[in-house]
Image (cartoon, helix red, strand yellow):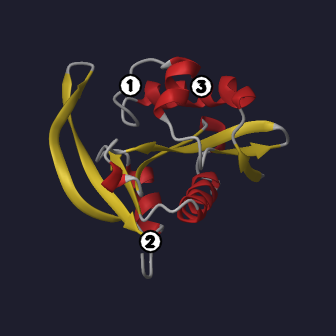
Amino acid sequence: MRIRPMKPTDWQNVEAIYLEAIATGFATFETESPGWEHWNERHLESSRLVADEDGEVIGWAALLPVSSRTVYEGVAEVAIYVGKKARGKGVGKQLLQTLIIASEAEGFWTLESQIFPENRAALALHLKNGFSKVGLREKIGQHDGVWKDNILLERRRKGNF
């Protein structure tokens, strides 16, 4: 497996993995694919990654801006998803660690993630990679008519910034 930059031609596989995550009910508030155009507009152009195994995309990670205000240019939200067949094999760990390095090289000093409490694997992954819990956003949104909480995590770049 290798981690490489995401290409627009990867979208079909990225979307399939995203749809698998949507189907779990605890990975995102989304209920359907946003489609390439909307996804591409929302995610930052830098730090888009895929995990590729023998030419097949098995996971992906990307960053979203947390605000359009200049003061927050160094703060981004993490999106990371691993396909069903590849879960539990360290793909998420490699993606997240590579994303952290890439984001810091791009000048980001804070990464945020919002995770449903029942998504224990995602919580563990983030906590093992330098993220800290900074809050609980109670009943922040509904998914299929059910109010859901999000645990807010963040990771700060080490050293002077």
Q: CA distance from mark 1 to mark 2?
A: 29 Å
Q: Which residue is mark 2?
A: 157
Q: Which residue is mark 3?
A: 15
For the residue pair 87 and 2, the one nearer the viewer reads as 2
Q: Amino acid at mark 1?
A: Glu
Determine the secondary structure under disc 1.
loop
Q: Residues within 10 Å of mark 1 (few under 14, many from 20)?
A: some
* Residue drawn where x is 21% and y is 30% of the image: 141
Apparent side of residue 24 relative to residue 135 in the rendered image (left or right): right
**For the residues carrying marks 1 and 2, which lies nearer the camera in this image?**
2
For the residue pair 6 and 117, the one nearer the viewer reads as 6
Instruction: Give percent across and percent down for residue 154.
Output: 34, 61
Q: Amino acid at mark 2?
A: Arg
Q: Which residue is mark 1?
A: 30
Q: Amino acid at mark 3?
A: Glu
Determine the secondary structure under disc 2.
loop
